Image (spheres, rainbow, N blue to C red):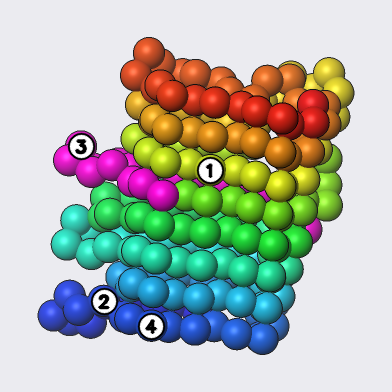
Amino acid sequence: MYIGADADLHPSRNIQVLNSTFDRNGRQGISVTGAEHVLIKNNTIADVRMCVIDLEPMSTDWYVKDVEIVRNTLGPRRITVLSAATQGDVDNVTLSDNTVIGTLRLVVEAKNAAERYSGFTLVVNVATAVVNSGGPSMGFTKVDDVYLSGNTIRFKAGSDSDLMALENSAHILIENNDLSGVDSIFNLRDSLSYDCVASNNKI
């Protein structure tokens, strides 16, 4: 499914994707490239070749804002559950109460020098697989206001796997999650990230 802007760069608005089954796509599950106020709820999106949910404005003139991904079954997939790594603005994204078949892997990166992403909330999601390879499960670059709470994201003990790699990102709160076996919660890749707090997580 593709949700984008029209030829005059007007974004799609007030879109709902509900109670559907999507299987065996050769690229993305759902791509949102130019839209605001999008609800993706009670769907199954499985056997995706790349990422399940792709938030990818086509240029700096396009944007994606206010996306809720709620109570879906996501995966299996080959690369990520959610990706937002592009030139246009991406803000206010919520991933809530989903079952992730596999590991909960995210890549979020504001690639335009003039942009910063903000407002990524992950609450009460459950990943069915244990992270068993080295490296971070999530990466955030030039992203502010990230909140994780009540998620189950387990790691194989001794696998040298981190929860989150951060570059030039700020105001990160990780609390009340089951992160059993994680090597470290934050992997700071530069000196520009700050206000990164972890509290009351099971490790």
Residue 141, quarter of the rendered image: top left
- Identify the residue at image location x=38%, y=13%: 191
Q: Which residue is mark 2?
A: 11
Query: What numbered label is drawn on residue 113?
Result: 3
Q: Do labels 3 and 2 touch, CB within 8 Å?
A: no
Q: CA distance from mark 3 to mark 2?
A: 22 Å
Q: Nearer the viewer, residue 32 or 200?
A: 200
Q: Earlier in the sequence, mark 1 or mark 3?
A: 3
Q: Amino acid at mark 1?
A: Tyr
Residue mark closest to the camera, 1 vs 4: 1
Q: Nearer the viewer, residue 48 or 156?
A: 156
Few, some or many C-alpha atoms within 10 Å of disc 1 (few <14, some 14-19, many ≥20)? Answer: some
Q: Position of residue 179 (x, y in %)?
A: 76, 34
Q: Which residue is mark 4?
A: 14
Residue mark closest to the camera, 1 vs 3: 1
Q: CA distance from mark 1 to mark 4?
A: 24 Å
Q: CA distance from mark 3 to mark 4?
A: 29 Å
Q: Amino acid at mark 2?
A: Pro
